[in-house]
Amino acid sequence: MSSDATTTTGTDPRAAAAADPDRDIDVLVLGGAGVDTIVHVPELPLPLADSHMIGTGIVTRAGQTGDFVALGLHRLGLRTHHLDHLGADPEGELVRAFHRDHGIGLTAVPQPAGTKRAVNLVGPDGRRLSLYDATRGRDEDRLPPATVRALAARSRHVHVSITQPCAHALPDLRAEGVTLSTDLHDWDGRAAYHEPFALAADLVFLSATALDDPERTLREILSRGRAQLAVATDGAAGAHLLTGADEPLVHVPAVTPAAPVVDSNGAGDAFAAGFLHAWLAGAPARTCALHGSIAGAHACTVPATRAEAIGRDALLAEAARLGAAAGGGPGHHARHVRIEG
């Protein structure tokens, strides 16, 4: 598949799903619900000391990877629903309130071990160190197959977080015939845990942070699995886009944020949301990557203590501006497709 191609025939699964009146959910987000405690530190790594005074405060708020993807998709006008385990605890109430306040559909499966939580140490340059509480889960945790399949049957697309219950849900999702995406985050290209997600998805996102050779990893994903498109985000270096196992690797330049960078937390989730918004509208892969880059750049300007994502009008205006700056006129980057909410 060429990176400039747009499939317009009825065989495109995106078009078929969009035309199905029973699919009243644009994107089902599976997993990744939880709470983060944000600590802005003077530097990373943090110097060893008995104590540090945190003048900016320590803030606990709802929002892990699935929550932020769901928020990004919702802000872009897509009908979004989120399914995950939540505990009957204060953290779970924060997550429920997050979805309720933003108007995002949520199906919460009881989690006796408690809601997932993490501590994020954020440096002055926006880099972060995340500490995840591994006790908020059990080996036997499963999302109810009937619930997974019922929600998938109503969805045009499913975005799957790389949590253990979601791995067990992959066969049920595939049985429903819905397209899947996943974010492998900082996978090194070798850890076996990530492989079921990488090989089952139609669209794969990951970070280049831990990759020795991003192109090699992207080609292995496409040659071994179902995916026809994979993209590795690379911070200020942009992103690497592959649209077929035998296609050339495409470099996508980074988008300069409109405001100072304060926190990189959530940038990858925002990239996935922006990319999927364009992809579900049938846009070419380069346009999808541009929209992902715009959304990711915006996320870097938002403090981690806030839950905020770029809106549809702002994203499309920035895409048009960048298109005009590139010499293609206001519609240069989206000339192949009309993107609607």
Image (tube, rainbow, N blue to C red):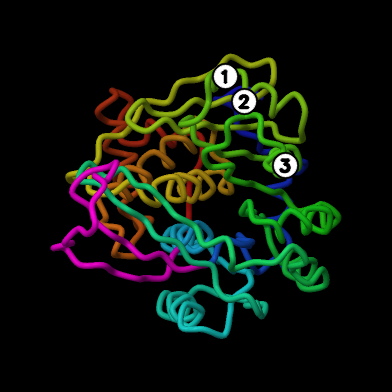
Query: Which residue type carries mark 2?
Result: Leu
| Disc sitting over residue 215 in the figure | 1
Query: Which residue type carries mark 3?
Result: Asp
Q: Position of residue 156 (x, y in %)?
A: 68, 57
Q: Position of residue 128 (x, y in %)?
A: 34, 47
- The magenta stretch is 34-63
- Read off the residue under disc 2: 218
- Read off the residue under disc 3: 12
Q: Residue shown at 53%/60% (left/top)? A: 66
Q: Is residue 230 left or right of residue 196?
A: left
Q: Position of residue 325 (x, y in %)?
A: 24, 28
Near mark 2 (Cα within 10 A), the count class, few <14, some 14-19 or many ≥20, is many
Q: Residue shown at 22%/59% (left/top)? A: 51
- Asked if residue 152 is positioned above or below residue 183 in the image, the reply reads below
Image quarter hosting the N terminus: top right
Secondary structure at numbered mark 2: helix
In this rendering, the label closer to the viewer, 3 or 2: 2
The total number of labels drawn is 3
**Badge 1 vs badge 2, beta-carbon distance below 8 Å:** yes
